[in-house]
Amino acid sequence: MKTTLWATLTANGNYAQSSSENPPKKEALDDFAAHAIAAGNFIVGRRTFEGMLENGSVGGGPFADLDIVVVSGNAGDLPGVTVARSPQEALNYLQQKGHQTALIGAGADLHNAFLSKGLVDEVIFNVVPVMEGKGLNLLIDKDNYQYKHVQLLDCKPLGSGVIQLRYAMDR
């Protein structure tokens, strides 16, 4: 199964944090929806999923017919989704459902869990035109300085200053 990690980054390289002062760019959200629909699924962390519930992003619309997997060690029942306890359990579930691609959608901690376990084949970064102070980073190993070379597959503007970079990763 091919796994694609999708993330929004700031112009200075941080994992972009959304807030009322810095809402997500429409172009990035539309791009995520297009990738999720193409994959037929997406995987998110519990806090991200709860945020999606609060702002009405799930429960209908473009995500109505998708397999949504929430990875959490302490989530109870969540409406309309499957809860997995680990990244590998999430991938196993989607593979058993017949999916050829898994889209890892949101949450820096979850992204880092997939990256540190070497479970990512491709990354899609939407770089938004904002600089951020203290921020989060995507890491392949939080304890050691490591390098993982990637191959640029595509680079394109999405509009409103958002640039998309797509890289292949060796597993």
Image: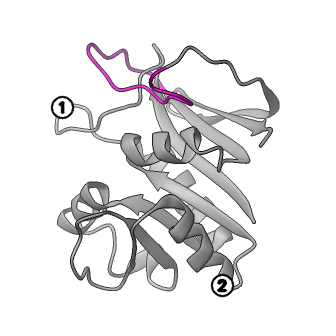
Task: Report whether 99 appears left or right of 65.
Answer: right
Q: Position of residue 26 (x, y in %)?
A: 42, 47
In the picture of the structure, the residue carrying the numbered disc 2 is 96
In the rendered image, the vertical position of residue 31 relative to residue 115, given as above or below: below
Q: Position of residue 160 (x, y in %)?
A: 50, 32
C-alpha distance separating marks 2 and 1: 41 Å
Q: Which residue is located at x 56 percent, y 63 percent?
A: 88
Q: Magenta residues: mostly which secondary structure?
A: loop
Secondary structure category for the residue under label 2: helix
- Using a 10 Å C-alpha cutoff, classify the residue at mark 2 as few (fewer than 14 neighbours), some (14 to 19) or many (20 or more): few
Secondary structure category for the residue under label 1: loop
- 2 vs 1, front mark: 2
Q: Is-magenta flag for residue 71?
A: no
- Indicate the quadrant containing the N terminus: top left, top right, bottom left or bottom right: bottom right
Which range of residues does the magenta coloring cover? 128-143
In the picture of the structure, the residue carrying the numbered disc 1 is 21
Disc 2 residue type (three-letter): Gln
